Image: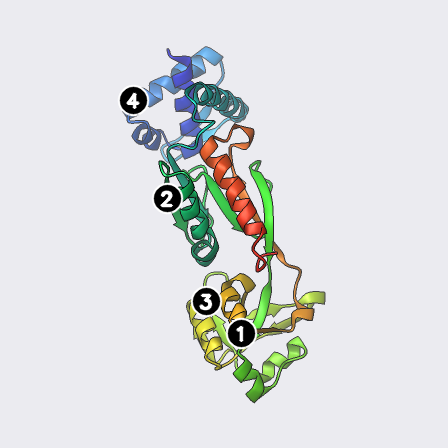
Amino acid sequence: MDRWQAMRIFAKVAETGSFADTARHMHMSAPAVTRAVAALEDLIGARLFVRTTRSVKMTEAGTRYFEDCRRILADIAEAEAAAGGSYATPTGTLAITASALFGQMYVLPIVTEFLNTFPTMHARTLFIDRPVNIVEEGVDVAVRIGHLRDSGFSAIKVGTVRHVICGSPSYFESHGVPTTPADLKNHRIAASTSAWASPEWRFANDQRVTIDPLLQCNTNDAVITAARAGWGLTRVLHYQIGPALLAGELQIVLSDHEEPPMPIHILHPEGRHAPAKVRAFVDMAAARLRENRLLN
């Protein structure tokens, strides 16, 4: 048995939780995957998976072995890449994920700059408002907004974002400026009904206001458009209105009552083993995001 290949097969089964999916990913037959794992179990003298008709779960021994396998396989990949030079020069395809609007506004310009800098590189973006499993979905780098759970990934803080209340100068001229969160009940509100939206708007010192929006829209873009047109107030993440703020089309109010800002991090799973394409992009992205005054 090829020990290295068997470890690769075992690690892929552990990641996917499926012998069939592993077979497809590795262009093998399902019986060949099963035989490789069984041979590895015989060699080690311990059961690595508990198999049922519906699921595949690692045993305690399998979990420990998986961590060792990942480290060993990463060391092998690093040695091979170093010998071939790919750890010195970015090569291949880079996959990047971020939330939809943030990705389009702030990450995509960095991606295109990266491709201009390294013209032999390719890139794939996944800008979407849902949690993305970096390992399972083949993503190299993620830009995440919010407090992170301990994932074991490398994380670099590059900025912060705030929840803000905003409206147009013309709206404030006609309807006045709210000075406390409770004043929002006297104003026209446009609210998003997106997946992360809530009818309860929270502020500093545990202040909470349950809003009754006259206008509900299914996207943040729509409520921002309504606010820019002078129809009413809305609450968004401040990066989403960056261009409108710079143009003077929107103004932020109640800034003294805002919750603490949320951090922005760049994540990647490979740590010190990251290939050149990841290290080069992370360095560029960290520099560009940190120098953006709307995010810092």
Q: Nearer the viewer, mark 3 or mark 4?
A: 3
Q: Which badge, 3 or 4, comes first in the chain's sequence? A: 4
Q: CA distance from mark 2 to mark 1?
A: 34 Å
Residue type at mark 2: give it.
Answer: Arg
Residue 188's place in the image compared with 32, above or below, is below
Q: Which badge, 4 or 1, comes first in the chain's sequence? A: 4
Q: CA distance from mark 1 to mark 3?
A: 19 Å
Residue 200's place in the image compared with 177, above or below, is above
90 lies left or right of 163: left
Asked if the residue under mark 1 is in contact with the one under mark 4, i.e. CB atoms within 8 Å, the reply is no
Q: Which residue is mark 2?
A: 124
Q: Residue 206, percent across and down?
A: 69, 66
Residue type at mark 4: give it.
Answer: Pro
Q: Nearer the viewer, mark 2 or mark 1?
A: 1
Using the image as rendered, state which of residue 195 and residue 190 is in the foreground: 190
Q: CA distance from mark 3 to mark 2?
A: 24 Å
Q: CA distance from mark 4 to mark 1?
A: 64 Å
Q: Which badge, 3 or 2, comes first in the chain's sequence? A: 2
Q: Secondary structure at mark 2?
A: strand
Q: Which residue is mark 1?
A: 248
Q: Secondary structure at mark 1?
A: loop
Q: Residue at x 53, y 74 (%)?
A: 248
Q: Considering the image in quadrants, where does the C terminus appear? A: bottom right
Q: Secondary structure at mark 3?
A: helix
Q: Which badge, 4 or 2, comes first in the chain's sequence? A: 4
Q: Residue 136, percent across and down?
A: 42, 38
Q: Residue at x 49, y 25 (%)?
A: 70
Residue type at mark 1: give it.
Answer: Gly
Asked if the residue under mark 2 is in contact with the one under mark 3, i.e. CB atoms within 8 Å, the reply is no
Q: CA distance from mark 3 to mark 4?
A: 49 Å
